Image (cartoon, helix red, strand yellow):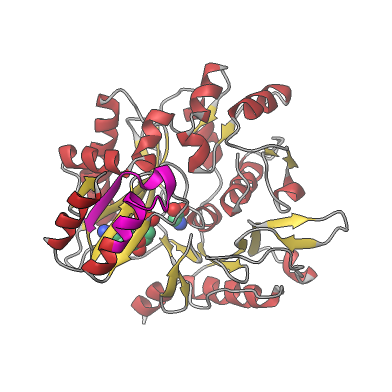
Amino acid sequence: MGGGGREHALAWACRRDCPESTVFCLPGNAGTARIATNLPGSATDVATVVRAARDNRIDLVIVGPEGPLAAGLVDALAKEGIPVFGPTAAAARIEASKAFAKELMGRSGVPTARSRTFTELDAAERYIDAHTEPLVVKASGLAGGKGAIVCATRTEARAAARAMLAENALGKAGSEMLVEEFLEGEELSVLAITDGEHFAILPPAQDHKRLQDGDFGPNTGGMGAYCPVSVATPALLRRIADEIIAPTLSALKADGAPYRGVLYVGLMLRPDGSPAVIEFNCRFGDPEAQAILAAMPSGLVPVLRLIAEGGWMPSGISLGDARHASVTTVLAAEGYPDAPVLGAEISIPAELEATPDVLLFHAGTAQGPDGRLRVAGGRVLGVTAIAPTIAEAAQRSRVAAESIRFEGKQFRRDIGWRELARKR
Ligand code: AMP
Ligand code: GLY
């Protein structure tokens, strides 16, 4: 379910891990159309999805994006007896309500930025005035990546709070919001596959949120990712498992909302090395999924299926070893992230499509009636390269990203720079 780069990568993983299977994507994109059957409709339209699953005798649904999860797609499919991988709406609140996630972390002792939740502007402004800069102002609800505003000054923070609470800038998503302490450090994405009780951590990844090289420019949905990440040592991952993932899953279970699916933990590694949660997501990250799935050996999809069918994770299973190093460079449209310009024709060199260590995961692409591939979204393509080292994968991904052409193409040439700096 879904139509971005993450979903193309998931469809590709289904084909790799279960070669006899038939794969459908709803709605998919021009890339998934090459390896699967695209079905019409929207992933958030629950009735359409249930009907499509029944009509096509689907025996495993994997839900990509947070919207359908928060809207109860998993609950609806499960009620029809259709195996589905992803959390229920109640469990997906861990992403869909940051206020809920903070409250749960607070009572479970999970390390995270200090914060307070507000629905009234006066109270939010008083809190902002009483705290030191910088501050982060966040919509509690789902805001499509536009909900977190890092504010260098209290003046900016007051303006962000006013936009959300008084000017309805993010609609319902921002009618409840949080003011949060700014965390210093390096970000890390740790994803765990879980049956609600047992879990296995996937190879860790690092996203690149800013538009421009060197982590400058506006925040985006993610301009690239790499996997694995050497700062995420086995000891650090054990700490994240014990101090963050296990207590979070226990609390959700105790609340009557056991979490089955993939839990994405967005972390800040503070200067003293300790991890703190920035946010939880109830799904695979995008573009992290493209890098992680390409780096992993085959074998993940049967585990997703087992969980979807209501089973427990096989005990002692490890999904954490990367087989390759991988780097994904995102190609974005002109004007992304503010106002992406759609319609440009995309040209991909034929030899690139035939290169086995470069995977092209489509995101905002569409193939018109004239057969031409065109830009149809802000993030257009993810160019994932696999290699024995991050340095080689980064080089291959960058060269391939350069060779794809469309008007106004934007991309970063430095994906994986932190890892390369560490190696130096
Ligand atoms: P989110 O929309 O929650 O993924 O946040 C987007 C980005 O804002 C994160 O990836 C961080 O780079 C930054 N961010 C969010 N919260 C904090 C925080 N408390 N301290 C520092 N940076 C943050
Ligand atoms: N790449 C960050 C996310 O998927 O939310």
Q: Is residue 101 left or right of residue 346?
A: left
In the rendered image, the quadrant that contains the N terminus is top right
Q: Is residue 238 left or right of residue 222?
A: left
Quick check: can you spot residue 233? Answer: no
Above or below — where is 133 with respect to 261? below
| Percent coordinates x, y for residue 192 in the rendering | 38, 43
Image-quadrant location for residue 11? top right
- Residue furthest left in the image: 130
| Percent coordinates x, y for residue 311 in the rendering | 45, 24
Q: Is residue 117 left or right of residue 381?
A: left
- Residue furthest bottom in the image: 424
Q: Is residue 360 magenta?
A: no
Q: Is residue 86 left or right of residue 188?
A: right
Above or below — where is 219 with respect to 414? above
Q: Quadrant of ligand 2?
A: bottom left
For the point 11% across and 60% down, the residue is 130
| Percent coordinates x, y for residue 90 in the rendering | 38, 29
Image-quadrant location for residue 148? bottom left
Q: Is residue 164 magenta?
A: yes
For the point 63% across and 50% down, the residue is 8
Counting the numbered discs, the total is: 0
- What is the magenta range? 159-180
- Residue furthest top in the image: 80
Image-quadrant location for residue 261? top left
In the rendered image, the quadrant that contains the C terminus is bottom left
Give the camera-side residue of 243 and 79: 79
Quick check: can you spot residue 304? Answer: yes
| Percent coordinates x, y for residue 291 in the rendering | 52, 58
Above or below — where is 102 with respect to 236? above
Give the camera-side residue of 387 and 359: 359
